[in-house]
Amino acid sequence: MTAPTARPVVRVRDLKRTFTLKGVLNGVDLDIARGEFVALLGRSGSGKSTLLRAIADLDSEAQGSGEIEAPANIAVVFQDARLLPWKRVLENVALGLTGPDVRARGQRALEEVELGDRGRSWPYELSGGEQQRVALARSLVREPALLLADEPFGALDALTRIRMHALLKRLSQAHQPAVLLVTHDVDEAIELADRVVLLDDGRIAANLDVRLPPAGPARVELFMDLRRQLLGLLGVENELAEVR
Amino acid sequence: MNAMTGGVLEIAEELPGAEPFGREAPIVAPAVRARRRRRLGLGEPLPFGPLLGPGLLLLYWCVFSYTGLLDPRILPSPWATLATARDLTADGRLPANLAVSAIRAAEGLAFGVVAGLAVALISGLSRLGGYVFDSLVQMKRAIPTLALIPLVILWLGIGEPMKITVIALSVFIPIYLQTHTALRGTELKYLELAETLNLSRWRFLRDVVLPGALPGFMLGLRFAVMGAWLALVVVEQLNATSGIGYMIDLARTYAQTDVIVVGLVVYALLGLGSDAAVRFAEARLIGWRRTLAQ
């Protein structure tokens, strides 16, 4: 997956983290190549958010050891859109941007997420999906080398989530950041990512290439096969069958 | 409220008659539910609704005075009070004293707000500042401003500086407390966001902390404005030679109950008016918030 010659964007070696309450990492190694889309899959408490927060340098209160190399230019999308309620939508997107024509850049980013006409709105006037699109625009307007997304669609309804998947895929192809998407949704991971890293109990349990061929029977078959494999690794393959 | 209930009832009554050919009874429920209110909300706001309470008080006062249940020596009637107010206005005493009082309160308020805000910023935004100032302010808070008056008089005499200082002291506390609490209450999630966006400390303060603390400051301002009027009442009855409080104190000497009542009503109206002004400013400044009140 990772070309051996190219230097990875993210390089994690033997990362260990302990918290008093939640999330433990027991020696994680992870490389993410330039422009690669990695989905980090795992059950609740498997340490996937802990790993993301460590890479984002948001874990100042954690104890641990190990090495992390990550670009300076990281953008994070949280599960909640985390818009500042006292700033209008466009100001939220442009928050902290420097350089010329900040507003124009913010406006272009809003148009990319199809919210070009909502720049003057307050965040509370937007739906949950729209707020999360603003959060995406806020991240991508910075042209990050690495986009970290911590279950960004977890709070959205199923239909909105499908539309967000298409949007994220389109945007990541257009901007080409390396992406680390934390999720517990197997379909989402296969659909969006080039590679799925499965985390279990603070360790990497599997590392699967999930690039799919273009639409067709082969795609569906591979999709279902990967889905079965991943659900099996997560230990939920036979639950419904047993009920039947 | 009545009009609405009536409207709903009308619809409910009209519906069965409007469809004479339907054998089955028409379903009325959707029409009845046409205008829904928030079930757990406060209902529709009424224009001038906040004047209802004062209006009722005035009504009681009128009724008791008119029926003679209220001895005018204890409390003069509203119309006598009004006449006195007119006379006091005509001979210039009321406007002159009112101007003096308003300027005093405004000066005290200005000094108190500036000082309270400055100390709250130092104490709220830096750990060292908090260590230096917060306990001191909490200690000051435990001492009633009234208890400080003897000391302030010894230091500053009984002139204007003393009066303005006492007002400023009682304004300082609510401004400090509410602003400090709001600044320290900045949510961790916004701090994380600011860190991931690489905001500088200055921009973090300007774009995140300060606007987030604005509602707290405005709440403090409401307490502060009331505090300013209360302190004014006290200092104006201490050897003052002008102001509404002085007018009241003088009236006590001559047993002019009506003048005292005029003064009290003026204080009450000033308090109500200034609180409404702060609330108006609050609504304009904090348009991004949705609350129960809206």
Image: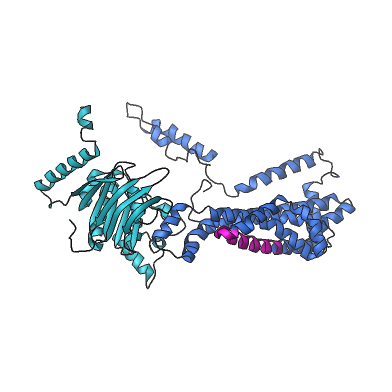
Chain colours: A cyan, B blue
Q: Nearer the viewer, residue A75 or A24?
A: A24
- Is B127 inside the magenta-drawn segment? yes
**Residue displayed at 57% across by 53% down:** B181
Question: Range of the magenta residues?
Answer: B107-129
Q: Quadrant of residue A199?
A: top left
Q: Nearer the viewer, residue A15 or B70?
A: A15
Q: Main secondary structure of the magenta part?
A: helix
The residue most toward the left is A217
Q: Nearer the viewer, residue B99 or B56?
A: B99
Residue A156 left/right relative to B62:
left
Q: Is residue B12 visible to the viewer in this orientation of the structure? A: yes
Residue A30 left/right relative to A87:
left
The C terminus of chain A sits in image quarter: top left
The N terminus of chain A sits in image quarter: bottom left
**Residue displayed at 36% across by 56% down:** A56
The residue most toward the right is B254
Q: Is residue B200 above or below residue A61?
A: below
